[in-house]
Amino acid sequence: LALALLALVPAVSLVAADEASRQRYAEAFRRFDYPEDVFDELECHDEMDEELCPMHDDTIPCGGVAVVEAFCRELLGEAIVKADEGKGAGKGLNALEGCKTYVSWDDDKAVCCPSDHCWDEEYDSEDDYDEDEELVDDDEFWSGDDEEDIEAEEF
């Protein structure tokens, strides 16, 4: 019987640690449950990317509202999501709303989570670069001027 109880102790402590982590995540995300106009005042938790962001699948941040919400619900756990359910969005009280703002790459979101996939989707497919500027080689940037006496600037 004593051995059986000892075998349960590590499992119980893992659940408690998981719940403690979820509470920490909820507090971090609640800071992002604000309107877009205050995002400039908030700083992403870069040191917590491995914990707060979907590093296992970088398609999630630009995968749409349902995909981001599913990730956030799983990360936070239903107990936290349900506890915050009655709290309106935009008041700094709703962890799920803050998580969606933190993780998502939608236009009105904070865009805190790194994602090569989303970057490629967002920027590599656009022709937003100035056509007058072109890369000469890896070490030089050509300003686009056709003057022969103007040298390329070294990086």
Image (cartoon, helix red, strand yellow):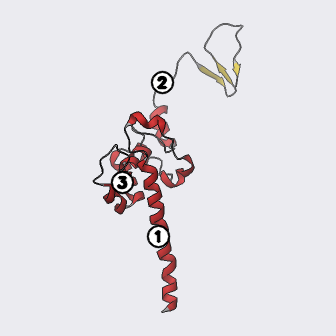
Mark 3–mark 2 distance (CA, rounded to whole Å): 32 Å
Question: Could you say where residue 27 lies in the image, as x and y percent from the top left?
Answer: 44, 53
Question: Could you say where residue 59 lies in the image, as x and y percent from the top left?
Answer: 44, 46
Indicate the amino acid at tag 1.
Ala
Badge 1 crowding class, 10 Å Cα cut-off, few under 14, some 14 to 19, many 20 or more, is few
- Marks 1 and 2: which is nearer the front? 1
Residue bearing mark 3 = 70
Badge 3 crowding class, 10 Å Cα cut-off, few under 14, some 14 to 19, many 20 or more, is few
Q: Residue at x 40, y 39 (%)?
A: 109
- Whether residue 8 appears in this view of the structure is yes
- Answer with mark 3 or mark 2, whichever residue precedes in sequence: 3
* SS category of the residue bearing label 1: helix
- Answer with mark 1 or mark 2, whichever residue precedes in sequence: 1
- Marks 3 and 1: which is nearer the front? 1
Indicate the amino acid at tag 3.
Ala
Residue bearing mark 2 = 128
The label shown at residue 16 is 1
